[in-house]
Amino acid sequence: MTNKSLTKFLPVFIIFVFFSQQFIYSQDTTSSLAYKKKPQFFRYSMFYRADLSYQLWHQFKLVQKANEGDPIAEHELGLRYLMGEGFVADTTLAAKWIGKAAGKNLTSAEYNYAILLNNGWGVEWNPFKAYDFFQRAALDGMPQAEYILGVTHLNNLVVKKDLLIAYEWLKKSAESGFLPAKEYLIKLEKKISPAILKKERKRASKKSLKSKTFNNYLTGSTTTGLELIDFDLIQDSATKITDKIILGTFLTGTNANLADTLGITEKNDSSLNILKSGLPFLNRSAEAGNPEALTLLGRMYEKGKYFEKNNIKAAAYYLRAARLNYPIAANLLYQLTKDPKLIHKIRDAAKKQEAIPMYIWYGLYVLGMERDIAPKDAFKLLYDAANKKYVPAMVELGLSYYTGNLVKKDKDRAKKMWESATKLGSQEALTRIAATNILEQKYKNIKLDIDILLKSEKMGSILSEVTLGSLYEKGLGVIKDKAKAVMYYRSAAQRGNSFAFNQLRKMYDEIRPAKFRF
């Protein structure tokens, strides 16, 4: 990447990511690193496997039949290469054989090949070609594929968002008993006018019977690379964020391991019951810049669960998550600070030079929730809170200096502030230093900086996810890899990060076919 193009790219990245104010191990012949780094992606629960005797075939017979052009044998051989069953795992060979079977109209192969295409596993990343294969499987009556087509018509990436087409496919999937489709159909029906909904229900009821039957063992938490990105829900300040919604954000993607540590499952009720032994891990994840962890801690302080009830601390945690461009936290902060008594309490404490209230008052100003203060006074609140060694304020002050928000831009002072916060144990500050080192190409040890980002990403740092996406998209410090960039951007977008979604859409637009439906 040229210095000229880097200079053009950096300000946009910094504004939206660093300072947003908006609500299997295998012998792999593919260039994609997703499989190598994320072996947990390849699970039986991800790919559709028909219940056929071919699964019991010996390797020799299976290879023989596949070479003869038997599509079921080709598909089974591809799955065995994918899972490393009897063969050295190889995503490229897996995609080759599954693709052959998909080309012969084998429904399960069409579905599985679409997953590989959509993630760039063993083949070049191509979500549009993936859409074609998902559609073929859906037209065969496969409920999992019908669900994915419904989601695709809501995400506004491959095809233009269309609630009615999405409704039609989700309803077909739901009527086949696919639980994820049933669950989202209820939410979708609330977004469609009653008159149109009545018409659509009547039209959908006339659908023909399916000629094929499929197992419905795949679940909504199954990772296909096509999970729903519902900004309408998470960015609506009128939406009531329940404890169940907060806990549900841990069940897929980046936070799945943390969910296990906390004992969070799909059966969790709305009582915020988690394993108390997991609280230290929750705290570490929060300090790394994990917005879901910060939000859950805020909720615990707001409800007095595991900690003494403290709405000021709750507001501080919500604010920290909101500053990471996490809409759910911004919503909760907005709802919490509508209480005039709490606002009065925050202001009084801030005037007494208490660090956390000063930080909150400043934060409410930059988020546009509080305008009864001058910009210079808002900055002074942040500056004073940072001088009291309140780490979140120190990290935020570094951002102000870096971006020139409310103060003259000074990148050297920004880095020094982050270094001071790092010495006090801030993983988030360390992550920001590593990210800016690479993005500005001023690193001393790029391997060390990337290792820092990878460590933080494993702890749920959304900044690390978006930064890694940018590095792989631009080829900064790593080999350019679109599939891996998409993986990181998609994960961050599914968590509500609008910058990641916009970058993702840009990557889709770059390869969008010149076809009307796309």
Image (tube, grey):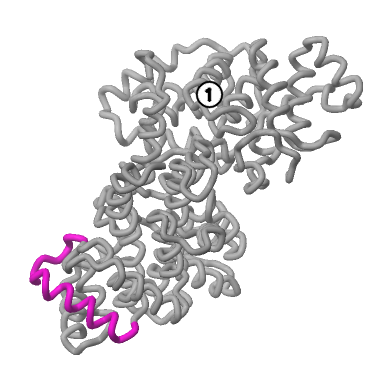
Spot occupied by residue 280 in the image (x, y as percentages of width and height):
55, 75
Residue 411 visible to the viewer: yes
The residue closer to the viewer here, 96 or 441, is 441
Spot occupied by residue 71 in the image (x, y as percentages of width and height):
74, 14
Which residue is drawn at the image coordinates 29% and 45% (left, top)? 8
Spot occupied by residue 402 in the image (x, y as percentages of width and height):
28, 64
What segment is highlighted magenta in the picture?
367-389
Which residue is drawn at the image coordinates 28% and 51% (left, top)? 11
The residue to which callout 1 is attached is: 130
Which residue is drawn at the image coordinates 44% and 74% (left, top)? 426
Mark 1: which amino acid?
A: Ala
Which residue is drawn at the image coordinates 40% and 38% (left, top)? 504
Classify mark 1: helix, strand or loop. helix
Spot occupied by residue 40 in the image (x, y as percentages of width and height):
66, 47
Where residue 376 sits, quadrant-wise, is bottom left
Mark 1 Cα-neighbour bin, 10 Å: few <14, some 14–19, many ≥20: many
Where residue 438 sits, quadrant-wise, is bottom left
